[in-house]
Image: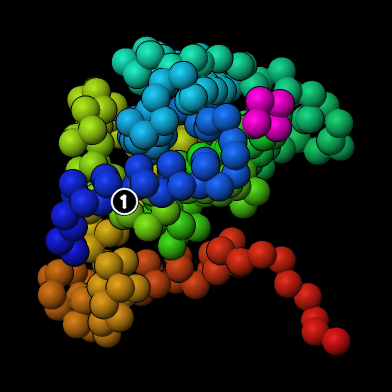
Amino acid sequence: MRQLDYEEAITKLVSFIREKVEEANASGVVVGVSGGVDSATTAFLAVKVLGKEKVLGLIMPYYENQDVEDAKLVCEALGINYKIINIKPVVDAFEKSFDFEPDKITRGNIMVRTRMILLYAYANQYNLLVLGTSNKSELLTGYYTKWGDGASDYAPLINLYKMEVWEIAKRLGVPERIIKKKPTAGLWIGQTDEDELCISYKLLDEILYRLVDLKMPKEKIAEELNIPIEKVKYVENLIKKSEHKRKLPTGPEF
């Protein structure tokens, strides 16, 4: 992996947040706090630069599980105002209007887009910016919902790999319980990021860095990491098939 100066990175991150809030003449920011390391790190950065009074946390569970307690831990550790909104009634209302029974992927996407709507409702009402929590690993592999958790005004972590987010979280004082838990989007019981991606974040980031940043040949990456070339091709395919997610809608030119 690349060698980041993490203290310098934190300085850049907080400067970025300050600059964007000032440019927009916003009263602060709203963050969807999931109980995971990305949203916790984003919230910690926001409080570091703006102060706790200008950061609102929204905890938006579909299931009542440990993630809610972890999200509350983050908000209470920071001393920010937070609201818990159960999205199940909203998602259920959407489902009642369908003439089909949504599968777990469809339902998961509805859940995430419901959270986006709530974040923007609070942002609009209180003159806040929506701070996204996506990282570079998710962005490159398309591991997010288009117009859901991929939608925000600004995403401070978007150019940091997952492994780098963990390092920054440690330096910011994010609770150890949050740093050590298995990453999950909480879209169904037992769901974890690494199970869905079929690869660990550590190996994923090592491959992504070499493919995207260093533009190394696939054969060289496989040799350097001592892995089958199929693993590298698998990650390359994740990047290719999610390209549409990283672009605004397009149409023919006239």
Residue drawn at 64 percent across, 22 percent down:
87
Report the span colored magenta.
122-127
- The spot of residue 207 in percent (x, y) is 27, 67
Q: Residue 243's quadrant in the figure? A: bottom right
Q: Is residue 26 visible?
A: yes
Which image quadrant: the N terminus?
bottom left
- Name the spot of residue 17 as percent of width and height, x first: 43, 43
Is residue 20 located in the magenta-colored stretch of the structure? no
Please indicate whether residue 99 sits to the left or right of residue 233 in the image.
right
Residue 71 appears in the picture as rendered:
no
**Quarter the C terminus occupies:** bottom right
Q: Nearer the viewer, residue 34 or 14?
A: 14
Q: Residue at x 65, y 48 (%)?
A: 147
Secondary element at tag 1: helix
Residue type at the position of mark 1: Lys
Residue that appears at 35% across and 42% down: 14
In the image, residue 198 above or below residue 248: above
Rendering coords of residue 23 (x, y %): 55, 47
User: How many tags in the picture?
Assistant: 1
Location of mark 1 (residue): 12
Which one is in front, 112 or 103? 112
Q: Residue at x 19, y 82 (%)?
A: 220
SS majority, magenta: helix
| Percent coordinates x, y for residue 38 in the rendering | 37, 38
